[in-house]
Amino acid sequence: VISFVMDCAHSHDIATIIDREGVAVRAGHHCAQPLMDANNIVSTTRASVGSYTTFEDFDRLADSLVKVKKIFGDL
């Protein structure tokens, strides 16, 4: 499991864009709201990795994150 934030966009916006690129992720508190509150984190995007995950899946995720940065003006 990889949870991350991007300064340029909210996790729900990130998840929506990534989903449109065919990558399934989750956005929100992930049952860790007290920890997130303690660290001043509003929410995160979470990508899960399994035995079925391919290198192409990682490439698609990376390409999608670049698209997020372009859309929200961070590139």
Image (cartoon, grey):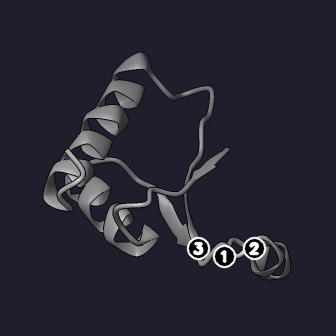
Disc 3: which residue:
43
Can you give x and y, in whole percent of width and height, for residue 22 in the image?
Answer: 26, 48
The CA distance from mark 3 to mark 1 is 5 Å
In the rendering, which numbered label is found on residue 17? none
The nearer-to-camera label among 3 and 1 is 3
The residue that appears at 40% across and 74% down in the rendered structure is 12
- Image position of 55 (left or right of 43): left
Q: Are marks 2 and 1 in contact (CB under 8 Å)?
A: yes
Q: Are marks 3 and 1 in contact (CB under 8 Å)?
A: yes
The CA distance from mark 2 to mark 3 is 7 Å
The amino acid type found where label 3 is placed reads Ser
Residue extending farthest top: 55
Can you give x and y, in whole percent of width and height, for residue 1 in the image?
Answer: 67, 44
| Location of residue 20 by image quarter | bottom left
Can you give x and y, in whole percent of width and height, for residue 10 in the image?
Answer: 41, 72
Disc 2: which residue:
36
Q: Is residue 67 above or below residue 71?
A: above
In what element is the residue under mark 2? Answer: helix
Question: Which of the marked residues, 2 or 1, is nearer the chain's N terminus?
Answer: 1
Estimate how packed mark 2 is, as few (under 14), some (14 to 19) or many (20 or more) residues with alpha carbons within 10 Å: some
Disc 1: which residue:
29
- Image position of 50 (left or right of 59): right
Q: Which quarter of the rendered picture does the C terminus lie within?
A: top left
The amino acid type found where label 2 is placed reads Met
In what element is the residue under mark 3? Answer: loop
Q: Is residue 66 above or below residue 74?
A: above
Can you give x and y, in whole percent of width and height, for residue 34 in the image?
Answer: 84, 81
The amino acid type found where label 1 is placed reads His
Question: Which of the marked residues, 3 or 1, is nearer the chain's N terminus?
Answer: 1
